Amino acid sequence: MKKTKILWLSNVPPIPLSSDGSTIAGGWLSGALDSIRKESSIELTLSFPIASNVFEEQGVVDGIPYYGFHVSGYPKYNQLKQIHKKLLKRKLKAIIDSVKPDILHVFGTEFAHSRIAIEYFGKPDNTIIHIQGLVSRIAQHAVEGLPGRVRYMAVPSSLLHPTPTGQANRWRRAGKDEIKAIQGVSNVGGRTEWDKACSSQINPKVRYFHCGETLRSVFYLEDSRWSLSHCKKHSIYFSQGFDQIKGLHLVLPNMGELIRRYPDVHLYIGGPSPIKAGFLKRRAYGFYIASLIRRYELNDYVTFMGPQTAEQVVENLKSAHVFLSSSLIENSPNAVGEALMVGVPVVSSDVGGVKDFIDHGKSGFIYPVDEPYMIPYYVGRIFDKPELATEISSEGKKSALKTYDREKNGLDLVAVYAFLEEHQY
């Protein structure tokens, strides 16, 4: 039987490249790979950006061939950008010519290499984009809740890093490539009503496939389960506070109400700390977060935990009384999905596709993103009512087991490939 050649083009490696066997980056992509790894009808090749002089540009890991290519981030000068794009185009051409894929599957649209590869491949009916976030939409929400003085705040690190408004403008510029990419294909895969609406607005002729995502394997283990009796009471876990889009600046001003009601409340924040960098390296958003912590006297109530492995995230979720997401915009945040799978009660802003997998009051609580004063109310309901916390935990797990069903999501993805192979032109 002839195998269908699939080339995955992603923003991060979904396979382990480090010496200890851990996946450097990739998150749910590594779960998606595991869900189809043993499928006999396809021949899979991976391609993704790699760090210069760190890993081999081409190789095989666990039987799957990969091709790496270098990206330069955000060159400041147009001349450098053009040189970089020419080199990137040459490299992507070489990869596609070598693999000769039947189907190109692009994960994410926020970087120029996605558009370049799609245009060179030149087969819109045989190309599918997996919608992750959409930077053209994210840019529209990126400074919500930030005071005007913070949006344009210039600090020493502004020579290298953008202001919050500058970051929004970067996403807006990247959105131009994203729009061209989506307009250049016939197929997209998504998982929420939000990404279906947005992709069809960009390309009204696009064919939409529902493609559920698969979490990293550790989140499916029986040991990765939350229980009220073993969590740290009145603790809140927040997955990431470095990126302005995650909305930490909306949470901190509302901590006072929780502290008044629960003096032992504590907010644990994963990911890189926005305030850890020294004065010369700290970004504008980090200065604002630090000022909020000082203003509301939160030093004893907030802990930045640093980057966390998947196993550490599981333990953080099991230890938390509540998982909180206050994002300004999301498609379907996998951090929320991971929390639901572990079973910790979730409170989330109602943005993007969140309502597609949280049934308000049943499997979690959602609140309007511009009403962050509702955070203490919903967190307090979970803190105060053990029976409610247990019920929400149970319903959240049931919902997540369906949404992130590895076997079903793998079969659905293979079915999409079979459809595209059958309808090639």
Image (tube, rainbow, N blue to C red):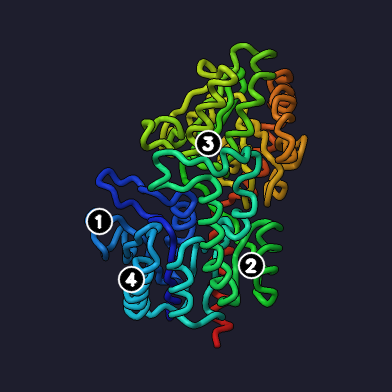
> Any mark on residue 389, and which?
none
- Quadrant assignment for the N terminus: bottom left
**For the residue marked with disc 3, what is the amino acid?**
Ser
Q: Residue at x 52, y 36 (%)?
A: 241
Q: Which element type, helix, strand or loop, lies under badge 3?
A: loop
Q: Earlier in the sequence, mark 3 or mark 2?
A: 2
Q: Quadrant of the C terminus?
A: bottom right
The image quadrant of residue 113 is bottom left
Which circle, 1 or 4, is nearer the viewer? 4
Using a 10 Å C-alpha cutoff, classify the residue at mark 1 as few (fewer than 14 neighbours), some (14 to 19) or many (20 or more).
few
On the rendered structure, is 268 left or right of 251? left
Task: Give whichever of discs 1 and 4 has the lower sequence position.
Answer: 1
Residue furthest toward the top?
263
Q: CA distance from mark 4 to mark 2?
A: 36 Å
- Identify the residue position indicated by label 4 in the image: 83
Residue on which disc 2 sits: 209
Residue 239 is tagged as 3
Mark 1 sits on what residue?
A: 55
